[in-house]
Amino acid sequence: MWLPILLTVIIGYLLGNLNGAVCISHLVAHEDVRTQGSGNAGLTNFIRVYGAGKALSVILIDGGKAAASCLVGGLLLKPYGMFHEGMAIGGAAVMLGHVFPVLLGFKGGKGILSGFFVALTVDWRVALVILTIFAMAYLTTRYVSLGSVLGSIAFGVGFIIFYHNNLTVLLCGVFMAALATFMHRENIKRLLKGQERKTNLFGKGSKQ
């Protein structure tokens, strides 16, 4: 059983290295999105720099790799009666690869988009909770970071509620939630100081 788990982790981590924002910025602007804006390789910075019109390709890449990693893990561990555990392990691995991609110098995104699609693949109920919390926070404040942090917390809480009887899935969910929250530590500091930028996710540029 350990070999399928190892394969799940390796495949998921490598898939995580395929960063949508970096790939599309090279294709459309022949530059690395990490050299622009906030320097982050995530969807929010991509939209700030290049606009929402090109964001669908980023979503498809990051969402696709997250779903693929979960499904690969699920299929590899299904013969051992661990389909959901395999999906959760694959999700944790792809998140780790997205945030700390070895092929991109360990400078990746913050894991929100990938994490949402992991949740959507593993359990749509968790994804619905995340989307609801994020939407409410963003639409009332225009702070993507606030929605992301609250969504990350909801991610962990959702897995605790729905998988309290499955330690592997629960721990993977908590790990992913903690990782995404940790990656927003600077945003949290700016939010507390009232210095965080507001963002228009449906257009281009930040709002002060």
Image (cartoon, rainbow, N blue to C red):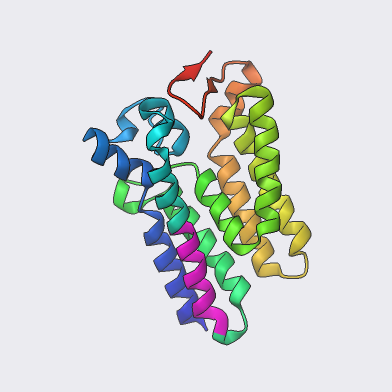
Tell me which segment is drawn in magenta.
65-78
- Residue lying at 42% horizontally and 60% vertically, measured from the top left: 13
User: In the orientation shown, which residue stands out farthest toward the top?
Assistant: 208
User: In the orientation shown, which residue stands out farthest toward the left?
Assistant: 30
From the image, give the main secondary structure of the stretch colored magenta.
helix
Residue 112: x percent and y percent?
A: 54, 44
- Residue lying at 56% horizontally and 72% vertically, measured from the top left: 86
User: In the orientation shown, which residue stands out farthest toward the bottom?
Assistant: 79
Q: Is residue 195 above or below residue 189?
A: above
What is the quadrant of residue 168 in the picture?
A: bottom right
Q: Is residue 91 above or below residue 139?
A: below
Residue 52: x percent and y percent?
A: 43, 32
Question: Which one is in front, 199 or 91?
Answer: 199
Residue 144: x percent and y percent?
A: 57, 30
- Residue lying at 61% horizontally and 78% vertically, measured from the top left: 82
Is 64 left or right of 33, judged from the image as shown? Answer: right
